[in-house]
Image: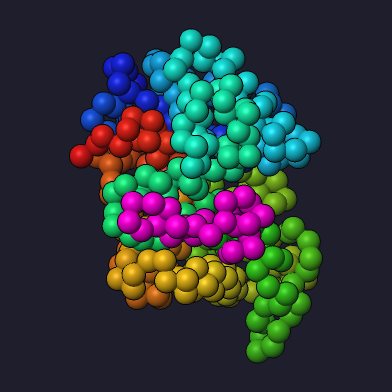
Amino acid sequence: MPVSPSPEQWVGWDLGGAHLKAVRLDAMGAVGGVFQVPCPLWQGLDRLEEGIDRVLSALGDPGTRHAITMTGELVDLFDDRPSGVRALVAAMQRRFPSADLRVFAGFDGLLDPVSAVAAASQVASANWMATASFLASRLPAGLLVDVGSTTTDLVPFSAGRVSASGYTDHERLEQEELVYTGVVRTPLMSLGSRAPWEGGWVPVMAEQFATTADVYRLTGDLPDHADVLPSADGREKTPGASARRLGRMVGLDAVRADLPRWRRMASFFAERQLRTIADACDRVLSRDLVPDNAPLVGAGVGRFVARRLAERLQRPYVAFESFYRSASGDGGLNVGDCAPAAAVASLAAGNAFS
């Protein structure tokens, strides 16, 4: 049932290119709702409008205080990032014309819409910074590992501040604090040029026949609530169909092997992805920005990967959702799945939660 908002409640929004996420927090920091809907923003701003409608239908009365962070300005609907920021901020203003609307701008904090558009370079793709800033206020030190559907953020923090070496997407890619790999949308061809088969190696086709969603369907790790986007071929999302798509990657039909063999191939690709993220983690941690006993904080729909990474690196693991009471939403969603939305709402409310 929707929660009646009090004046102190905030709704945090993460405007992504593929998903729209929202989290409502009450005056005591308890989660009053967690929402994620598909939002293929590259197809048009109407997709955002539809996504907001879906969230509001579940949210009920949205209240009058909203905080926004985003990555959707990157989609090719927009000519450049400032245009995307301007369009997304304007869209939220249209939907909530009388609301107290704040936009997260990294080191500049939460700004009013006019100021946010003028600071577009700070607003663009700053959702990782919102999450890390919240964590820096709650833990002495750590490494945020936010594994989403498309990307992975690796963000060190210590002594109450974010210690990232990069800020823009370009800088973060260079520093490997942004790794363009996730557990749903990543094409398998990006994880390796070959795969093991019958005692040898077979080249992987440079076609988007399959994605990491197929891998984690076969391994059983992909949560149902994270599996909301169409498959690579637009067909069913079952283990058998995922095996068929994996087979295409190596030029085979699924009937060429039984399901356990396709699961072994899926495990190979999962391991390749884990190694990619682990290598980036090793690089980030080698800067000695966080102590050796500092935890990895897992967030995102792929935080099961973050947990495995913590085990591999022999570090403590902390789940993002552990910082919130009543962390679960509808349909299996958890506040950890929508960490930037929760974080920006917390920052807007002043982190005054016990």
Name the image quarter holding the C terminus: top left
- 163 vs 247: above or below: above
State which quadrant residue 255 falls in: bottom right
Instruction: Kindly give the residue lying farthest to the left in the view shown.
Output: 354
Which one is nearer the viewer's eye here, 222 or 274?
A: 274
Q: Which residue appears at 70% of the width and 46% of the height?
A: 234
**Residue 81's spot in the image, x, y percent?**
70, 38
Residue 8 left/right relative to 345 = left
**Residue 16's spot in the image, x, y percent?**
58, 39
Q: Does residue 174 appear in this view?
A: yes
Residue 82 left/right relative to 226 = right
Q: Which residue appears at 45% of the width and 63% of the height?
A: 305
Which residue range is magenta in the image? 150-176
Colouring style? rainbow
| Magenta-drawn stretch contains 223 | no
Q: Does residue 222 appear in this view?
A: no
**Residue 154's spot in the image, x, y percent?**
49, 59
Instruction: Kindly give the residue lying farthest to the top in the view shown.
Output: 98
Name the image quarter holding the N terminus: top left
Residue 5 left/right relative to 127 = left
**Residue 316's spot in the image, x, y percent?**
30, 67
